[in-house]
Amino acid sequence: MQAEFDALHRNNTWELVSRSSTQNLVGCKCVFRIKRHPDGSIDRYKARLVAKGFHQRPGSDYTETFSPVVKPVTIRIVLTLAVRQGRSIRQLDVNNAFLQGTLKEEIFMLQPPGFVNKSFLDHVCRLKKALYGLKQAPRAWYTELRVFLLSLGFVNSTTYASIFIYQKLGSTLYLLVYVDDIILTGSSSTELSNLISTLVAQFSLKDLGCLNYFLGVEVIPSATGLFLSQRKYITDLLHKSGMANTKPASTPLSASAQLLKDSGDLLPCPTEYRALVGSLQYLSLTRPDITFNTNKLAQFMQHPRTTHWSAFKWVLCIFISATAPLTFHAYSDADWAGGKDDYISTTGYLLYLGSTPISWSSRKQRSVARSSTEAEYKALADTASELLWVLSLFTDLGHMPTTNPVIFCDNLGATTLSANPIFHSRMKHIALAYQFVRENVQKGKFRVSFVSTDDQLADIFTKPLLHSRFDSLLSKLHLSSKSSNLRDDINYNN
């Protein structure tokens, strides 16, 4: 804790001022945690002084609080580009990031417990720099970093504000920000090293070298690309739920059992179920095969029952290829009236950059579809929206797809409707989705193509499947299954 307190003083975080009755005093506390390596071993012990932000008053102590963070799909796109072009990928960790953000508001805080200045017992801290726990702390740090990067010649991506792009004299650098974690990659190793040196001189941060562990995801290099794995996260989750020694299941969800809101007995303590399902949502960062399962189980969070309790045992990881072409294609699917409680359909889509799955989704539609064509067309509109956003980001990064993107749909009615200039009256209730997809098809932004149900990869996001069907689709998703330590299995010198 002394090291944390010394860091606060070095950053000139506050000044002591006299207490007055007009001040809204914010409390603070010390928080302790353990930082671990990807294999679970202890890296270091951390202590942090955290402000009690719930004491703050809106409009007085803070106004704007939102701070953008990089999306998982953006990380996958940038990593795919870097691997495909043979670029180095570096990682930085900012020390006490929020302490380096300058506050615009006037905030008063009680002196830290155990570190009260005995010469000024009746004084309080007037904060100059942001502290963890303050509502505007992430925004203050992001603003500080953004202003500095823009002064170096970087520009903000117009698609997503957490991406910064530098282009000069044939050199291109990408910088991705997730709070205090930064990913850097670029076409010039010299420019990359110079940028890191500049950032180190301006901010207190650590150069962690080549990217290997980011947001709980292991990044494992191989001769042909990168593996993205959450092996440690899965192992910890299995131990936490008491299922580490349970026999693995062949699929994440049984294809024969119907999960209904009133089936089975209520769980006596639903907290563990809710925590497990919440953990699965984060696990889907690298596990597209459990996306439908997670979506389905999350629908019973309010009153979970015994039949909703399920186990997840497999350890898989996304593989990013270094040789696949930089082309986009997507799969769109819907399970018409799949929800037997409310008969609402489920939308599923899967978006590829080359052979790398970069974006996927499984979610219930907002209204009941009157036909399978309507359900499929709603799914098609969601897929098209995601594809257009990704294409916009891809353009911001200075690239263009080498071929016209394709969305594969296994419904002939929806496929035909996407290019049909005649609007049928029986489909007028989905007019917005119809116009959105058709206009973009006519503009040549993408095309919609029919694919057989057997080859519909998005089928895995809309319904529980039999073991043979699940395994067949899983093999086409470009995931790699490893039961042992991936780092021990991969020969780095190949």
Image (cartoon, helix red, strand yellow):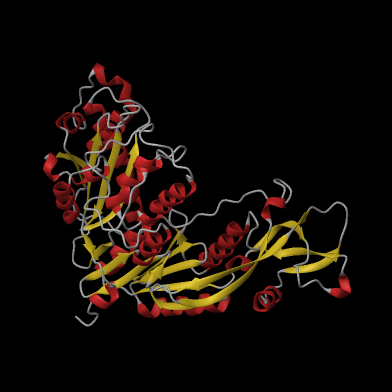
**Above or below — where is 102 with respect to 43?**
above
Q: Which of the 4 image quarters holds residue 125?
A: bottom right
Return the x and y of residue 130 as percentages of the image width and height: 66, 63
Left or right relative to 110: residue 404: left
Residue at image location 19% in from the left, 32% down from the top: 419
Q: Is residue 65 above or below residue 188?
A: above
Q: Residue furthest bottom?
A: 493
Picture residue at 56% right of the left edge, 63% below the top: 147
Residue 397 in percent (x, y) is at 35, 59
Quick check: 449 above or below 60?
above
Which is nearer the eye, 272 or 60? Answer: 272
In this rendering, the answer to whether 28 lies above or below 485 is: above
Left or right: 330 as drawn, with respect to 311: left
Front residue (pair 2, 280): 280
Q: Specify the quadrant that holds the N terminus.
A: bottom right
Residue 489 at x, y percent in the picture: 23, 75
Quadrant in which the C terminus is drawn: bottom left
- Left or right of 415 on screen, residue 164: right
Q: State whether residue 220 appears in this view.
A: yes
Residue at the spot 25% in from the left edge and 64% down from the top edge: 320
Place of residue 387 in the rendered image (x, y in percent of width and height, measured from the top left): 30, 46
